[in-house]
Amino acid sequence: MKEREKIASEKERLDRLNGEIERQLVGLERVLEGFDFLSSDVPPELETVGFTDQIRRILQQTSAPLTAVEIRDFLLAEGVQHSSAKNLLISVHTVLGRIETDLKKSEKNGKTAYIWKHIPRRRHVFPSGQVRDLAEGMYGLEPVPGYSGPKKVSE
């Protein structure tokens, strides 16, 4: 029995040592890959669109609110690989929580549905002549020769 205990403890020690050596080998492999990259003249491949960006794009391109399950189904249709559909759905919920401020929520079939908030573009407003004159005086700017401000469009 004592010999078996010694063998079991020795096996545990060797397993720990083996695990440490494996980690070191993986680390060294990554370092060598880094050196290969640095010594290579080949440009790096462009990174694929990230998971969050894929969800943003789906929400920005749709005109109807989507539930998390529908977003997951779109991702699966696009070929997103994940360990399981359930885990992918969890990841979708995580991203939706992260980008919640950019989304409008509604209800669809008893579930929360999301759509991208379309932020209206602001029109550029030219400053009035008084503000422009004030700015020129405050900042010591020279008036632009021949510029009399924006022209009014006659209807």
Image: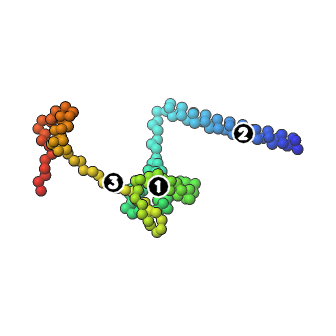
Q: Which residue is mark 2?
A: 16
Answer yes or no: is residue 54 visible: no
Q: Quadrant of residue 154?
A: bottom left
Please tell me which of labels 2 and 3 falls first in the chain: 2
Query: Measured from the top left, where is residue 120 in percent x and y?
Result: 30, 54
Please tell me which of labels 2 and 1 falls first in the chain: 2
CB contact under 8 Å: marks 2 and 1: no
Answer yes or no: is residue 63 visible: yes
User: Regarding mark 2 in the picture, which secondary structure is present there?
Assistant: helix
User: Regarding mark 1 in the picture, which secondary structure is present there?
Assistant: helix
Please state which amino acid type lies under the numbered disc 1: Leu
Measured Cα–Cα span from mark 2 to mark 1 = 40 Å
Q: If the image is split into quadrants, where does the C terminus sit?
A: bottom left
Horizontal side, residue 87 vs residue 105: left or right: right
Q: Residue furthest right?
A: 1
Please state which amino acid type lies under the numbered disc 3: Ile
Query: Measured from the top left, where is residue 60 in percent x and y?
Result: 38, 56
Please state which amino acid type lies under the numbered disc 2: Arg
Measured Cα–Cα span from mark 2 to mark 3 = 56 Å
Can you tell which of label 2 and label 1 is closer to the viewer? 1
Q: Nearer the viewer, residue 46 or 155?
A: 155
Q: If the image is split into quadrants, where does the N terminus sit?
A: top right
Label 1 Cα crowd, 10 Å radius (few <14 / some 14-19 / many 20+): some
Label drawn at residue 96: 1
Name the residue at 47% across, 54% down: 97
Query: Measured from the top left, where is residue 96 in percent x and y?
Result: 47, 55
Label 2 Cα crowd, 10 Å radius (few <14 / some 14-19 / many 20+): few
Q: Which residue is mark 3?
A: 119
Q: Quadrant of residue 14?
A: top right
**Above or below — where is 109 with respect to 105?**
below
Can you tell which of label 2 and label 3 is closer to the viewer? 3
